[in-house]
Image (cartoon, rainbow, N blue to C red):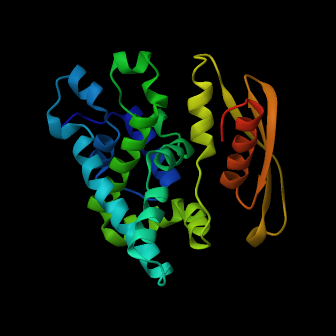
Amino acid sequence: MHSIDNQRLNLINELEEKTRYEFKNKQLLNIALTHSSYANQYDLPYAEHNERLEFLGDSVLSLVISEHIFNLNRSNTEGKLTKMRAGIVCEASLYQFAKDLNLGKYMLIGKGEEMTGGRERTSILADAYEALIAAIYIDGGYDKVRKFIISNFSDILNLSSVGEVIKDYKSRLQEFVQKDPGAVLRYETEKEEGPAHNRFFYVKLSLNDKFISRGTGKSKKEAEQEAAKFAIEVLGEEK
């Protein structure tokens, strides 16, 4: 296995703090963060990059979310539950959770992939998030990974529990502005109101440092989604 030096270990420890899970096997987390382009560049064995973990993480995530919505929505049909799960467990949501952890910062990526923006690529970050889920499952067991997933997916699960359709406006907006290679979106929390158990967030969205829209919500993610929705309308993107 590729070794973990002190600098790399510091990054791994930093990510562990963000996930609120401390690995017994640090190497497992390191593999979850290793992209195939890095393994190919340094001629590492197949098992030392994250594709196998991604495969397992996809199944673990699906099981946890399926179990949760099954118990939460006892009157829903199989078809409705399947549709709900598909809206929750999708590349767009995985990408956003990976971005929330700044997962790209901690990944080992090949030079070629690095030069073409691999650390920010939707598919790479979404796959790495699934690999992270698998790593937690192997290292800590089902209860630990379930706690991690439910905590991260809480906002989306709350929306689905009241029957709201989940639309990932942030990912749609990101895809839209990427037509301009130099475009940079920035979400900024302007203020928070209310007690800790009932907070309300106000978010400002800028494109290339130019104000474009605002959003509000009961969480930062919800406020950012609303800001992105308005931004799509401002930019003339079809709803």
Residue 143 location, quadrant: bottom left
Tell me: residue 24, above or below residue 105: below
Instruction: Kindly indicate the quadrant of the structure image that contains residue 47.
Output: top left
Query: Is 98 situated left or right of 178 in this image?
Result: left
Q: Quadrant of the C terminus?
A: top right
Residue 136: x %, y % from top left = 34, 58
Looking at the image, residue 104 sits to the left or right of residue 212; the answer is: left
The quarter of the image holding the N terminus is: top left
The residue that appears at 48% across and 54% down in the rendered structure is: 19
Rendered position, 236 above or below 157: above
Which residue is depicted at the point 46% across and 70% down? 80
Please name the residue shown 45% across and 38% down the image. 11
Q: Quadrant of residue 108?
A: top left
Question: Where is residue 111 drawn, in percent x and y?
Answer: 35, 17
User: Where is residue 212 shown, x and y percent of the image?
Assistant: 80, 32
Judging depth in this view, the residue of 238 and 201 nearest the camera is 238
Q: Position of residue 149 (x, y in %)?
A: 45, 62
Q: Looking at this view, is 196 or 21 the one in front?
A: 196
Q: Is residue 76 above or below residue 146?
A: below
Q: Is residue 32 left or right of residue 231?
A: left
Residue furthest to the left in view is 45
Residue at 33 percent across and 48 percent down: it is 131
